[in-house]
Image (cartoon, rainbow, N blue to C red):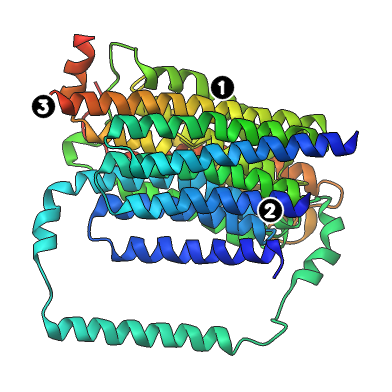
Amino acid sequence: MNTAIDIFTVVAICAGAAFFMAGSVGLLRFPDSLTRLHALTKADNLGLGLIVLGLLPQADSLLGGLKLVAVWLLVQLASATVAQLIAQALRHRGRGT
Amino acid sequence: MSVIQALDISLAVLVLAVAIWTIVSRDAFAAVVGYVAYGLLVSLVWVRLFAVDVALTEAAIGSGVTGVLLISAAVRLRGTEAAVAAEWPGAGSRVLAAALCMVVTAALAAVVLTMPDPGATLAPEAARHLAETELGNPVTAVLMAFRALDTLLEKVVLFLAVIGVWSLAADGNWGGIAGPRRATNRQGALAFLAQLLPPVGIVVAIHIVWIGANEPGGAFQGGAILAAMWMIVIMARLAEAPAIGERRLRLALVAGPAVFLAVGLMGFAVANAFLAYPAGLAKPLIVFVEVFMTLSIAVSLPMLVLGPPDRPSS
Amino acid sequence: MTEFLLGAAGFVLLTVAIGLIRVLGGPGNVDRTMAVQLLGTGGIAALLLVAAATGVRGAEDVALGLALLAAFASVAFVNSAAPEDDREAGRANE
């Protein structure tokens, strides 16, 4: 049973790390700011989400697990808002104001 | 080399790289972004050094209040930046600056390299007397009991800083309001964030102040998070900052230092020394003082970020 | 397991940090803001991984604090980048 849980953790964390790498590569390689923003939000959502999912079975208490989920939800909220704000700022500038 | 050593070394290299980049950068905004990133990395370093209290402070202050303060400052200075960048010091002053920097670096290196090993420490002493404070967190014990005078003076300094900022106000604005005006139209992503985040933030802040007695946490960290929550409400224009002449604001600013001082003076009567706590009552008194300190910190920090009042109160 | 978690933490941190150092030089302030946002999330991920591996007490609270304040630098940037009347006009249009 423990081995199965550990394999789950390893797979989820590897997938999360891959999203972080994709986010960084996207930030460096994508041609304009809006597409770079798209790459960034994927890392925020899925990268951290998968890592939290992988760490959940390793949490030593219920409170520890709840804190992990809370961290993920808060980052979701922050990242969604920031994506909106940055896109708005970009659109504003695009209009030539 | 084990994995953890590799992690620590790469973390150290990263911190140095971002620090050097921040210093070298000629663009103020880029340097501020570098500095915010630096603060985040440093809080990871503190966790690796098992100094979680410090990591929590760095996280709460660095990504909240100082980040906002420095970014606003960088944006405000943008107009003058071109003129500053165009000025290039002459060869003489550059050589002098380089020589001074090298002397300071050499002096610091000499001090670090000649430190006794193991260094002088009072840690075992503090750990031995931890039980007398009834606290579980040695950092809180040092801050609130063994070195309580330092902490009291720190809070007074914070209060003096607020007075210093306010004293920059123009005569007509004295007693007025600082920061952005309240918007009539409450829409958009920022208003949504500013309505959703503060309730969560207040719970986290109370949690961090409360567990500070036994685990990493405490008044400053919790107060800094509360301050950040207030800042976001003001930045989203959901509410205006209070006028600096308002009595409630001023009471909140002095509550922390005043209660701490009163408890300290009470020590003369009940425990024969300034800032001494009577046996058996140490922990409740410390928590009592911390609650008021949290309030004062949560109110002082946004006042520092917002700056002097720029319009009279209506 | 410990070694794996630490390795993953190092990997995540290095990828986002290399992205940051590369983007700090430009092209624009928006990209710098995005890079520091990504470093924030990556830093939180690395912190959670290190906390799970080394069992430092209270590290989740540091992550919680960082997550609460994750949006602050970007909000301050967007807020101060747009002049006041401009924002009001933009709102009225929507």
- Is B191 placed left or right of C68 in the picture? left
Marks 1 and 3, how far apart in space?
Answer: 38 Å
Q: Is B309 placed above or below A88 here?
A: below
Q: Residue at x 64, y 49 (%)?
A: C8
Q: Please determine whether, in this image, residue B198 is positioned above or below residue B97.
A: above
Q: Secondary structure at mark 3?
A: loop
Q: Residues within 10 Å of mark 1 (few under 14, many from 20)?
A: few
Is C85 positioned to the left or the right of C65 in the image?
A: left
Q: Amino acid at mark 2?
A: Leu
The x and y percentages for residue B103 are: 37, 88
Q: Nearer the viewer, mark 3 or mark 2?
A: 2
Disc 3 target residue:
A96
Tag 2 residue: C6
State which quadrant residue A74 falls in.
top right
User: Which residue in the structure is indicated by mark 1?
Assistant: B199
Counting from the top left corner in percent of width and height, residue B266 is at 70, 50
Residue C55 rendering spot, x and y as whole percentages: 77, 50
Going 66% across and 34% down the picture, which residue do you hit?
A52
Q: CA distance from mark 3 to mark 2?
A: 47 Å
Q: How many marks?
A: 3
Q: Nearer the viewer, residue B171 or C53?
A: C53
Type of residue at label 1?
Answer: Pro
Q: Is residue B206 above or below residue B95?
A: above
Q: What subunit carries mark 3?
A: A
